[in-house]
Amino acid sequence: MFATLTKQGLCAAALFTAFSVHAADKLPNVMILATGGTIAGTGATSTTTVGYTAAKIGVEKLIEAVPEMKTVANVKGEQVFQIASENMTNDHWLKLAKRVNELLKQSDVDGIVITHGTDTIEETAYFLNLTVKSKKPVVIVGAMRPATAISADGPINLYNAVGVAGSKDSAGRGVLVALNDEIQGAREVTKSSTMLANTFRAPELGNLGYVVRGKPVFYRATARKNTTDTEFDVSKLDKLPEVDIVYGYANAKRTPIDAFVAGGDVGIVHAGTGNGSLATPVKDALKEARGKGVVVVRSSRTGSGITARNGEANDDELDFVAADNLSPQKARILLMLALTKTKDTKEIQRMFYTY
Ligand code: DGL
């Protein structure tokens, strides 16, 4: 009797194992690359949602906290670095882009999730949107409450991001940002609130879709070229050109522009009032900068709309570039990558109308 039960038990165990292996074989393989941020943050109490410390919890613990992920994908974790994302640098971006491209070349990697601080998610997303050389899904995720808080949003955001990254429907849509059950496009997404869980918006243009029961539902696609359709390749770059941003406001001075030029910048993005307007002292300083070979891009601090060429300034005469509808922080990223290819302002303007 016992022998029969044992035999049946062993058969059941073998069947279960075979089923599990078979089931796992059918699940997508998703790599989780961790970089820090609030999603990995800890606070002194369960109600600490400000004044916590970002970038404390490692990727393995983030994965352990969401066992449900195993029902939607085979996940593996890798800690690429561990920082609060306000400290993200060009060097971090180059390291991350190279690692993403290395992994996506592997046939056993179907998609990548990057856990990241929300402060600069939009910048990392756009940088990768221009430098990832694969159509496989890359989904960036963060959280607005630390892992130790009541109703922490990190675990569900991570579960959803893995579901999006493991879905064939997410392929070929450029880099995606997924938080708060929404899927945003890398080019248009921006952090719009210091504190709300629905902080990620795409002003006027809206999100690309939603996550429902851990699966993506898309309603539109980004119109601009990205990933394998861009001319940018960072695989052999160890450094990016120095480009900084100057903010426009009433009574603005030329001081920061002169400082960036003296510091060796090769590009300057101006975040102008309205349609990229330039106060006279600022225009004079940017004109002198251009005369020294610095490439100048006019963008707007308004948060949406097109900064039109030859609108608030004569770009043809000044030999400036108009940012189209890119935010200043994203215009900086495109200008940096453009300057790895050319200093020709007509060519750079083409790139701002393309990506
Ligand atoms: N220090 C901020 C960052 O790492 C915290 C914000 C967050 O991750 O939500 O981006």
Image (cartoon, rainbow, N blue to C red):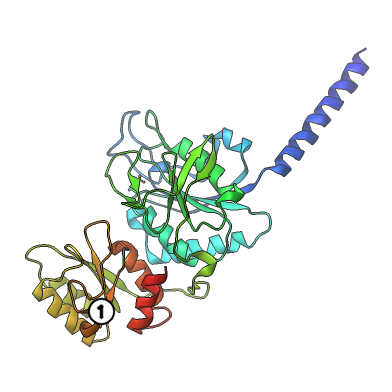
Q: Where's residue 180, x and y in %? A: 41, 39
Examine the rendered structure and indicate whether residue 304 appears above or below residue 309: above
Q: Nearer the viewer, residue 161 or 5?
A: 161
Q: Which of 164 and 17 is in front in this view?
A: 164
Quadrant of the image for the C terminus?
A: bottom left
Q: Mark 1 points at which residue?
A: 320
Q: Where's residue 42, x and y in %? A: 38, 38
Examine the rendered structure and indicate whether residue 8 appears above or below residue 206: above
Residue type at numbered disc 1: Phe
Q: Which of 55 and 247 is in front in this view?
A: 247
Q: Can residue 60 be seen in this view?
A: no
Q: Check disc 1 and report its element: helix, strand or loop.
A: loop
Q: Which quarter of the picture shows residue 343?
A: bottom left
**Left or right position of 261 against 117:** left
Q: Where's residue 267, x and y in %? A: 29, 76
Examine the rendered structure and indicate whether residue 221 appears above or below residue 247: above
**Left or right position of 216 against 143:** right
Residue appearing at x 47%, y 42% in the figure: 210
Residue appearing at x 27%, y 45% in the figure: 193
Give the mark count.
Answer: 1
Examine the rendered structure and indicate whether residue 105 appears above or below residue 208: below
